[in-house]
Amino acid sequence: MIRVGQGFDVHAFAPGRPLKLCGVIIPYELGLLGHSDADVAIHALMDALLGAAALGDIGKLFPDNDQKYEGADSTLLLKEVVALLHENNYKIVNFDITIIAQEPKISPYVGSMRAIMAPCCGIPLDCVSVKATTTEKLGFTGRKEGIAALACALIEKI
Ligand code: CDP
Ligand code: ZN
């Protein structure tokens, strides 16, 4: 049995915060605001994986009023989600993330992002895709108020 899931997330830019996307710290004048490390791309991915398994969402799994997740490294949260899928007899087939950002340029970091996420998910590099797009200066992403991310994931019952 194969199952598909989708995820979507948004975080606002804020000064004095690191910008972390797909586990990679990207040099930029602004970072993303959030209770955890605000890695919007991994958040969208986790929601896609949980959605595929109908296991809820990250808000349910990692409540943002729980001190435990303050500043949490999203790659560690991702590993928890993958472990939960394994407990439920699911393995990840592949996933695809789209980062929607006017700035900064994401493409130079895509290789590092894939190399970080593939082992977290226990899947080969060629099953991990990260893309980026601007919104041609339109909307909140175009005004550089924040970053949005979309993810789509396929999982398989073992
Ligand atoms: O419409 P399209 O996505 O082709 O154009 P765009 O939004 O101007 O993006 C052009 C290219 O820049 C895309 O192919 C992305 O790979 C890259 N890009 C990026 O690296 N970082 C961003 N924040 C946005 C786009
Ligand atoms: Zn988030």
Image (tube, rainbow, N blue to C red):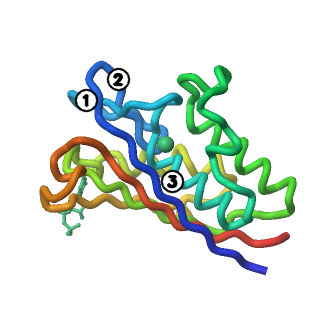
Q: Which residue is mark 3?
A: 44
Mark 3 close to ligand 2, CB under 8 Å: yes
Image position of 89 (left or right of 5): right
- Asked whether disc 1 touches disc 3, contact meaning CB atoms under 8 Å apart, the reply is no
Q: Would you identify the image quadrant in which residue 127 lies? A: bottom right
The location of residue 13, given as percent across then percent down, is: 29, 35
What's the residue type where badge 1 is placed? Leu
Query: Which residue matches tag 1?
Result: 30
Distance from Cα at disc 2 to Cα at disc 1: 6 Å
The reply to whether callout 2 and callout 1 are in contact (CB within 8 Å) is yes
**Other residues around mark 2 within 10 Å, as few (<14) / some (14–19) / many (≥20):** some
Name which residue lies at 63% across and 74% down: 4
Which residue is tagged 2? 17
Q: Amino acid at mark 3?
A: Ala
Label 3 crowd bin: few (<14), some (14–19), many (20+), radius 10 Å:
many
Q: Number of callouts in the render?
A: 3
- Label 1 secondary element: loop
Q: Residues within 10 Å of mark 1 (few under 14, many from 20)?
A: many
Point out the image quarter for the N terminus. Answer: bottom right
Residue 52 image offset from top left, x and y in percent? 67, 67
1 over 132 or under it: above or below? below
Where is 82 relative to 33, above or below? below
Q: CA distance from mark 2 to mark 3?
A: 20 Å
Q: Secondary structure at mark 3?
A: helix
Tell me what residue is drawn at x 72 percent, y 42 percent.
80
Left or right? Give the position of 66 relative to 29: right
Quarter placement of the C terminus:
bottom right
Q: Amino acid at mark 2?
A: Arg
Quarter of the displayed picture in which ligand 1 can be seen = bottom left
Dot placed on the residue nearer the N-terminal end, 2 or 1: 2
Question: Whole-percent x and y of residue 145?
Answer: 23, 41
